[in-house]
Amino acid sequence: MNKKQEIFEFRGVDNLYVAEVIKDDAETYQCGTPIYLAPVAEVGKNVDSSSEAHYYDNKPMIVINSESADKITVVAAPPELEKLAMINGKPFDKETGMLVDGQRQDKYFALMYRTKGTDGKYRYVSRLKGTFGIPEESNKTEDSGTDATNTQIEYTGIYTTHEFEKGVEEDGAWTKGAAKGIVVDTRYGSADVSQFFEQVQTPDTIQTKTQTLVKEEAEG
């Protein structure tokens, strides 16, 4: 008999990290060291998808499915100006602490964070390739109330060019495939997430706790 699923809801998000995608081609997927972006208040995801039946001999014979890029909205405390310049491809002068709102340099980034459930357990998320839009900010006069404003940033996530060994699963067997990201849930399986944010995690880097222990024993 199948075990009944325990019910939980999402209640929390933290550990917002970004890393520049250095290389993404048929041979290699490589990112820089993840950098903590800012304290995060909310992360929302939206993906437009559609299905349409195609008719032959007056009958719906096949269904065509389509899926758009990920639209991820990040609401956070205003990031450090240098980090904001980095994700927006804007020039930054470290000597004066000045962001130059000039011509933008297009760059791709990986985005990582984790969500917390009402049961105290976590889902770890790694989005592998995307670009950040120019943040939405508003500023208004200070008054006697408690209102304040934060920063809202849109991240558009797409598939990698690189195909990972664990890209497509069918009947328990894996074949290569591109990916937009991974989600690791500590409620299921035995993934080792102790160093999740030290490098950008991909379908091929996630290991079980047992695999990590065996590797450490071999290296020791």
Image: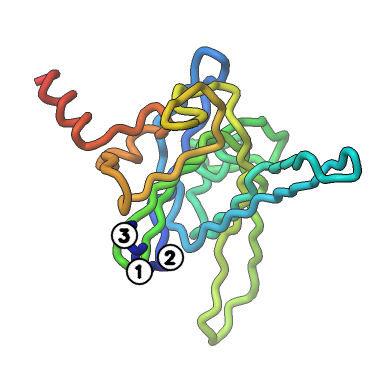
Q: Position of residue 184 (x, y in %)?
A: 38, 45
Q: Quickly name the residue at label 1.
A: 118
* Marks 3 and 2, the one that precedes in the sequence: 3
* Marks 2 and 1, the one that precedes in the sequence: 2
Which of 85/12 is in front? 12
| Residue type at tag 3 | Lys
Whether pointer 2 and pointer 1 mark residues with C-beta atoms closer than 8 Å, the reply is: yes
At mark 1, the secondary structure is loop
- Say the numbered circle drawn on residue 149: none
Q: Position of residue 119 (x, y in %)?
A: 31, 66
The residues bearing labels 2 and 1 have C-alpha atoms spaced at a distance of 6 Å
* Marks 3 and 1, the one that precedes in the sequence: 3
Inspect this view and state whether residue 200 appears: yes
What residue is drawn where x is 42% and y is 68%? 9
Q: Position of residue 78 (x, y in %)?
A: 52, 57
Q: Quadrant of the C terminus?
A: top left
The residues bearing labels 3 and 2 have C-alpha atoms spaced at a distance of 21 Å
Q: Quickly name the residue at label 2.
A: 10
| Residue type at tag 2 | Phe
Q: Quickly name the residue at label 3.
A: 3
At mark 3, the secondary structure is loop
